[in-house]
Amino acid sequence: MTERNVALLIVGGDSDPNTRRVVDQAHLRGIDYVFWDTDVPDTRQVAWDLVQPVIDLGDLRLRPAAAFLRCNVFNEAAAENAYAVHDTVESFALAWSDIRILNRRTSGAVNNKSRNLMLAQQCGFAIPETTVLGESSPLVHHPAADRVIV
């Protein structure tokens, strides 16, 4: 397997519009990238070691300069696969400090969207009405389900 240097490794699901946007922008800007689609079951073929900052993704052997990681929450059928791949690639990126990733200092901590929204609101950002639910079934009865963050 030949090792390849790549500017950007994108890990996430093709069914996630946010990840899709990053892939599209990388393509439009001519960035040398590899997209590892966690919607595909075979993408769990991920391995790396502590010898060098190289990651094996299926038949690819990559030395990425940067990584964009997003766990796909839009494809319930592929969720288990997405979490496994995301965690494995995130551990790789965190282990090698030369690999640029977003939020390196807080990646090991659990992200909390509600806390992030509160912080954004405290910083002066306009935040839409927000409802936090443990189950989506009550959403049907929400009076403005199309205008709030759920």
Image: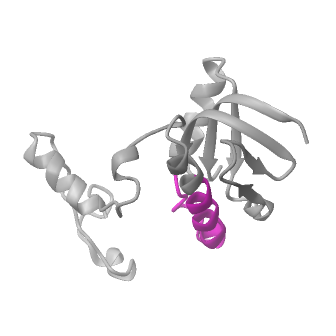
Q: Quadrant of residue 141?
A: bottom left
The answer to which of 30 and 6 lies nearer the viewer is 6
Q: Quadrant of the C terminus?
A: bottom left
Answer left or right for 74 relative to 44.
Answer: left
Asked whether residue 50 is drawn in magenta, I would say no
**Which secondary structure is most common in the magenta stretch?**
helix
Region in magenta: 70-89
The answer to which of 125 and 144 lies nearer the viewer is 125
Residue appearing at x 15%, y 42% in the figure = 126
Residue extending farthest to the front is 51
Q: Quadrant of the N terminus?
A: top right
Residue extending farthest to the top is 30
Q: Quadrant of residue 67?
A: top right
Vertical arrangement, residue 53 with respect to residue 133, above or below? above
- Residue 129 point in image, percent of width and height: 18, 57
- Residue 107 point in image, percent of width and height: 40, 53
Residue appearing at x 63%, y 20% in the figure = 28
- Residue 77 point in image, percent of width and height: 65, 72
Q: Quadrant of residue 38?
A: bottom right
Answer left or right for 32 relative to 83.
Answer: right
Residue appearing at x 58%, y 70% in the figure = 76
Vertical arrangement, residue 49 with respect to residue 66, above or below? below
Q: Number of labelled discs?
A: 0
Asked whether residue 76 is drawn in magenta, I would say yes
Residue extending farthest to the right is 1
The answer to which of 49 and 37 lies nearer the viewer is 49
Answer left or right for 57 relative to 90.
Answer: right
Residue appearing at x 54%, y 53% in the figure = 90
